[in-house]
Image (cartoon, rainbow, N blue to C red):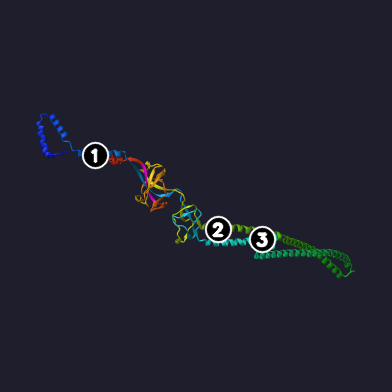
Amino acid sequence: MTIDSPRPAPATQAAQARQTRQQFANPEDYLSYELGKAVRELPPLYTRLLAGSLSLLVFGSIAWAHFSKVDEVATTNGELIPSAQIRPVRALDGGVLREVRVKEGDEVKQGDVLIVQDPTQTETAIARLQESAKLIRQDIARLEAERTGRSTAGTSTQDQLLAARLQDFDTRRAAAIAEANRQQAAIGAARAELARLQENLTNARSQLANAQERERSLRPLVADGVVPRFDYLEARDRLTEAENTVNSLPQSIAAQQQQIRQAEQSYQAALETANGLSAQRQSEILTQLNQRREELTNLEGQIAQTTTQQDRSIIRAPVSGRVYNLEANLSEGTIEPGEELLSIVPQDQTLLLEVKVLNRDIGFISEGMPAKVKLATFPFQEFGTIQGTVEQISPNATMDQNLGLVYTAQVKLDRTSMRVRGQEVDLVPGMAATAEIVTRQKSVLTFLVEPITRRFDEAFSVR
């Protein structure tokens, strides 16, 4: 092994170099001398190895930085949403809240009972309507029996009412027949009186003729004094009386004939009344039947509507899925019509992460790009990330108060649960998350040089 002697100090070396330069006649000889000296004074081996290693490390790092690729990502924030639309469950009718049979996150099947309202009010209304409908049906049965002439309507109460109505009809019909008979008797009496008056008129006319003959025969005898004047005056009075009787009897006969016509009209009216009672009764029965049937139809519609309302007091799951955003609270007591009680995330639906992409990143993002999803609930340093894929990007931007113009994008997750303490915990809509969308790959050297070149370009472009 060769032991190197210690090197002289720099000042001593400079003095020696001047002395050596003076010993040579020309510069070429001096240069040859220095080259030979440099060859004789090469550094030790470990120094050369260190220098070579450093050079290799530097150039190797540059080569690695040039060929090694890293992902450039666009970081976006958002929340989890179901791929299918969430089904809100609302109260169709208001009422008193009696029972909530589910809690947040429960799995339910289609048709499962979720919430029960107090049915007391609707049950009372249905009972009242059904009782009214029952009475109307009994009335209809009684009217049908009355129309067809049956003596029973099915219930004791209706039978009593039917008997009373039949008795009333018989009474009215008997009264009408009696009135017709009375008018018929009146007609007979009036006709007898007319015959008597007509006979009296015939007799009166005969008496008038006799009185006229007697007066004519006595008139000349009174003038000759053969017959006393008193006898003539008596004959004259009888003539006047006979004339008055003959003149008055036609008026009495006309009045009696008018009375007969009126009696005949009354008789016809009474007879028509007696004969029309049955038809009138049938018409009244049909009118009442139609009215009661219409009332029954309306009541049955009300019963059906109230029954439907009672059925709606039991709120069932419209689809199978998971209970989400449960707002029904027994402490509040009542619910209003149309009030949203809870929502159901449909079963077997994948979760999507809906994020807002900044305007500066949208040009580098397209559907199908991979993404890493980090959930705020589960720190990624401990629980890892979820792989996803950009599934949809909105064609138009919207204005966000904090971020400015943003585009809505949806990232489909590869799985919908996280393993926490040895158990699978399902992800639910509404969880906040961050998606790192891989837009492209860049070399490490580009990442290192890019800030310098950007600064350099900006330095020469600032006005």
Q: Residues within 10 Å of mark 2 (few under 14, many from 20)?
A: some
Which one is nearer the viewer's eye here, 165 or 224?
Answer: 165
* Residue labelled with disc 2: 307
Q: Report the Cα–Cα distance between label 1 and label 3.
A: 120 Å
- The disc at residue 143 is 3
| Amino acid type at image mark 3 | Leu
- Residue 196 against residue 431 in the figure, above or below: below
Q: Residue, x 57% and y 62% (percent of image)?
A: 127
**Proximity of marks 2 and 1: CB atoms separated by less than 8 Å:** no
Q: Report the Cα–Cα distance between label 2 and label 3.
A: 29 Å
What residue range appears in magenta?
432-439
Q: Position of residue 124 (x, y in %)?
A: 55, 62
- Residue 384 against residue 331 in the figure, above or below: above
- The disc at residue 5 is none
* Residue labelled with disc 1: 53
- Of callouts 1 and 3, the N-terminal one: 1
Residue 92 appearing in the image: no
